[in-house]
Image (cartoon, rainbow, N blue to C red):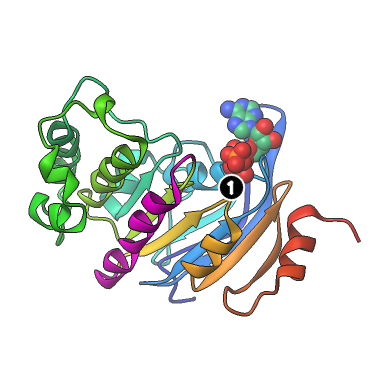
Amino acid sequence: MSGAILSTHGLIARYGDFQALYGIDFEIDAGEAVALIGANGAGKSTFLRALMGLLPVAAGMVRMEGTPIGGTATDRMVQMGVAIVPEGRRLFAGMSVEDNLRVAMDQAERLGRKGGWSLQRLHDLFPILKEKARTPVQSLSGGQQQMVSIGRALLCQPKLLLCDEISLGLAPKVIREIYAALPEVRAQGTSIILVEQDVGLAKQASDRLYCLLEGRVTLTGPSAEVTRDAISQAYFGGS
Ligand code: ATP
């Protein structure tokens, strides 16, 4: 058995009759950052949803620290130490920054998760969240909302953080600010799976990467070593 914090073997996921993932073999170690790249519709979000229990695993195996967990409910995944920063952020509109964050703190407490993240530490990571604590989230900029969404996931005290396109639609300066926070997250021993459309960013922020094409892994390797040509081939397919 490997020392992976999470691994999948032959993972298959479907939406009704449509098969979105065709047997994904994947693993991530403690403290590692792994990027998942691929074109629109390749299956990246589906993979994260299946890991998080938001979509049933049709076949195959998911293991968390060696224990099979395929088909586990989302609350249980949070309890086991997996948290997601979902595509589109999904904050509670009408609630303040702090109230959004408190929902996560309450969830962590209810599920008995303990860890090093607190409001104070989050404010050190993203000082704007302290400044805007009482502001309704819908009044924030996209980047600030993304910081709340990341903060909410961190307050679940994850061992593994799933990030779904956290740079999408944000200005380069804000993207840099958000990506600059990731090493701090990893320094806590938290592993990160990063779904990212921007290949340069994905390579830079990860130790290893996987490329998906039409629900299959077409490339995997150390991010510093995979070439642009190899990525291009894996991204678009063809021979
Ligand atoms: P994107 O960058 O567009 O989010 P992705 O790699 O994350 O791309 P997925 O969203 O995982 O891709 O989609 C994989 C496939 O599953 C696509 O063909 C998509 O059309 C299909 N799909 C995604 N969500 C659903 C759904 N709720 N119902 C049916 N099909 C879906």
Residue at image location 52% in from the left, 37% down from the top:
56
**Label 1 belongs to which residue?**
44
Q: Is residue 236 left or right of residue 121?
A: right
Would residue 58 be found to the left or right of residue 93 on screen? right
Residue lying furthest right: 239
Q: Residue at point 55% right, 55% down?
A: 61
Indicate yes or no: mark 1 CB to ligand 1 under 8 Å.
yes
Residue at horizontal 15 percent and vertical 49 percent from the top:
112
Kindly tell me whether residue 58 is visible in this rendering: no
Which span is picked out in magenta?
169-189
Where does the image place residue 33, in percent across and percent down from the top left? 44, 67
Q: Is 174 situated left or right of 17 in this image?
A: left
Q: Position of residue 219 (x, y in %)?
A: 70, 66
Q: Name the magenta segment's main secondary structure.
A: helix
In the rendered image, residue 218, in percent from the top left (x then y), is placed at 73, 61
Q: Residue at x 14, y 58 (%)?
A: 124
Quadrant housing the C terminus: bottom right
**Would residue 188 be counted in the magenta stretch?**
yes
Q: Amino acid at mark 1?
A: Lys
Does residue 49 show up magenta in the picture? no
Q: Position of residue 188 (x, y in %)?
A: 24, 69
Quadrant of ligand 1 in image: top right
